[in-house]
Image (tube, rainbow, N blue to C red):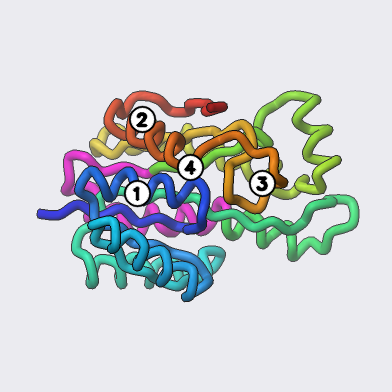
Amino acid sequence: MPRTIVICGYGPGVSDGVARKFGAEGFQVALVARSADRVQQGAKALGEAGITAKGFTCDLGDTAAVQRLVADVRAALGPITVVHWNAYAGVAGDLTTSDPSEVRKVFDVGVYGLVAAMQAALPVMRAQKDAAILVTGGGLALYDPRVDKMAVNWNTMGLAVCKAAQHKLVGVLHHKLAGDGIYVGELTVVGSVKGTAFDQGQATLEPSAIGNAFWRIYQGRSEIWLQFAG
């Protein structure tokens, strides 16, 4: 039976590296983003590389829509083996002035959407020996005064707080789902990734290298958090 990875928050950086690596290892790939053009173009490019891929549009901050997404992927590609959560909302940059609804939006995408996807996929994932939930973490989550100052200077305060919460979520889910044979792990990307919104021309991290690192932790199935800095 073919294995399927659902990549939530697809774009040209981390998630494309993950899609290409897992696709090269025999996975079918479901690409998910709000932009239909983005996922369709991504699926076409992966198809040209010999990878079975299909695009799906979804607001990943809408838990009901995420639940429907999981059902749609299963109907189109079969059982889901891996969920890769790469989605984030870049709002609420200044927590002293942002509307509280923006803060909620950051958590809707980074935490609530992830929980909804996990819960919806669990029944099928429990029946597979190599199921996993993989999360793209960020250096902004780290408890370090220099990182906190950076979040303020970069106007990414909301994202920093959400990534810290997501970091804890990975830890508790890792232990909760271990008994079901489901691996939960996070690759904390420290630095700027080429081709992403954070790339101001000085990014040094290659998406393909990050995809390889995700594959390593998926195969190893022991790391809860692993930092990747190139």
On residue 20, the disc is 1
Amino acid type shown at disc 2: Ile
The answer to the question of whether label 1 and label 3 lie on touching residues, with beta carbons closer than 8 A, is no
In the rendered image, residue 193, in percent from the top left (x then y), is placed at 58, 41
Q: Quadrant of the N terminus?
A: bottom left
Query: Which residue corresponds to mark 3?
Result: 199
The span from disc 2 to disc 1 (Cα, nearest Å) is: 16 Å
State yes or no: residue 118 in magenta.
Answer: yes
Q: Secondary structure at mark 3?
A: loop
Q: Is residue 62 left or right of residue 173?
A: right
| Residue 114 covered by magenta stretch | yes
Numbered range of the magenta stretch: 110-133
Going 68% across and 47% down the picture, which residue do you hit? 198
Dot 4 or dot 3: first in sequence order is 3
Residue placed most toward the observer, 189 or 148? 189
Q: Which mark is residue 217?
A: 2
Q: Is residue 152 visible?
A: yes
Give how far across and how far down residue 116 sits, in percent.
44, 59
Q: Residue flagged by tag 3: what amino acid is it?
A: Asp
The residue at which mark 4 appears reads as 207
**Secondary element at tag 1:** helix
Q: Quadrant of residue 178?
A: top left
Q: Amino acid at mark 1?
A: Arg
Badge 4 or badge 2: first in the primary sequence: 4
Q: Do the residues bearing badges 2 and 3 touch, measured as CB atoms within 8 Å?
A: no
Q: Residues within 10 Å of mark 3 (few under 14, many from 20)?
A: some
In the image, which disc is placed on residue 198? Answer: none
Q: Of the two numbered discs 1 and 3 on the same chain, state the one appearing first in sequence.
A: 1
**Cβ atoms at labels 1 and 4 below 8 Å apart:** yes
Q: Residues within 10 Å of mark 4 (few under 14, many from 20)?
A: many
